[in-house]
Image (cartoon, rainbow, N blue to C red):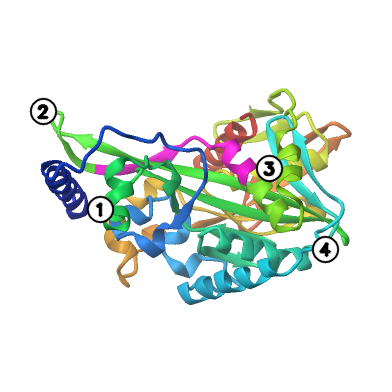
Amino acid sequence: MMNLMQLLRKYCASFLIVTISALGLVACKSVTTNDTVDYKSAGAVRGPNLSYPPDLITAQADRRYIVQDGSATMSEYNAAVKKSVQMRKNVMTGIPGMRIARDGERRWLVVDKPAPELYPQVKDFWQENGFLLVIDSPSTGIMETDWAENRAKISQDFIRSTLGSMLDSLYDTGERDKYKTRLEVINPDQTEIYITQRGALEKCTTDATGNCISTIWTSRPNDPELEAVFLARLMERLGMTQEQAKAQVALPLGPKTPKAKLVQEGVNTAHIEMAAGFDRAWRDAGLALDRSNFTVEDRNRANGIYYVRYVNPKDLGDTKGFFSNLFSSKDDSSLKAKKYLVVVKSTGDNSSSVYVQGADGKPENTAAGLQLLTLLTEQMQR
């Protein structure tokens, strides 16, 4: 059956529309959806049926597996917003030596500033933009937002603009986004900042007559333009003018050139070959991990190792089972993430290889290892 929130939306909206029409308030006027970005934390304003797309959802399902040096409470979020308002009253001198770097269709921010000084500012930035952090790890330079809805995608028609917040909870885009941010130390006084987006789309499952009987969450393609929007906003937050930030992001990207190839040596024995030196291979591997169902717990650039967790969506079972577990204290071992090492090795000035190892450092010559390498290859070729 259709869930309760959907039924409420359907019938309450119908009732209100009929009522307004009867009163003669409805005019033939509509406003097309604008292209702004306005997120409200899904965890803060939505019920469980729409808040968390099933991972799509990695180990967010069980907070025992969240890498979190800081906190992600609502009180902290509210405090951060108040703090940001006060900061805006001050004159920001900005950070010199800040630019957008690009490689093909990928963009990232390079800042001439130590990562420990940048991290708290980047954290405040996400909270100011309406997100709660489910991963907040200053020691690794990694943070991840919760799933949130871009409310700017909702058409501002006459009914909604007239009744305002009364109808707000009845409108839903059926889409959610979450963002990962990773700070990479290039040298003690220079930091690279990567922002990657993941999307989810709510789809109906229908019966034989075509009626929607339930909904499921599915992956939505990565949107580089959303990443660019937040890179520009972050540059503004760090002191660049809006015009300068937009101009940096708007510079043309290079051609899309696949640089990764999966080489299978046996039934479950494989590695990825890349036509790139170590620095580029390390960066591409990190972005592929960020855009996939991986959580980077730590990394060692000197040894070329990413320490990751991975939750196979197939292990989560059906959506109803997932949601019942999400808000229950009952233990469910099927939600435990497995740990792996993703190893990047230089094989020449313009060549590198990527391997997947088990948590013990031994080659992961299993079906799971091959699956992970296949997933990473697909992401690197996008």
Residue 44 lies, with reference to residue 108, above or below; the image says below
Among numbered discs 2 and 4, the one appearing first in the sequence: 4
Percent of width and height locating residue 343: 71, 47
Residue 285: mark in rendering:
3
Image position of 183 (left or right of 279): left
Q: Are marks 2 and 1 in contact (CB under 8 Å)?
A: no
| Front position among marks 4 and 3 | 4
Residue ID for mark 2: 209
Residue 283 belongs to magenta span:
no
Q: Whole-Å distance between the Cαs marked 2 and 4? A: 60 Å
Magenta residues? Answer: 215-229
Q: Whole-Å distance between the Cαs marked 3 and 1? A: 33 Å
Q: Whole-Å distance between the Cαs marked 2 and 1? A: 22 Å
Residue ID for mark 4: 114
Residue ID for mark 1: 320
Instruction: Give the residue type that dot 4 points to.
Output: Pro
Instruction: Give the residue type that dot 2 points to.
Output: Thr
Q: Whole-Å distance between the Cαs marked 4 and 3? A: 23 Å
Residue 220 belongs to magenta span:
yes
Depth check, front residue: 304 or 113: 113
Depth check, front residue: 259 or 115: 115
**Secondary structure state at the residue bearing disc 2:** loop
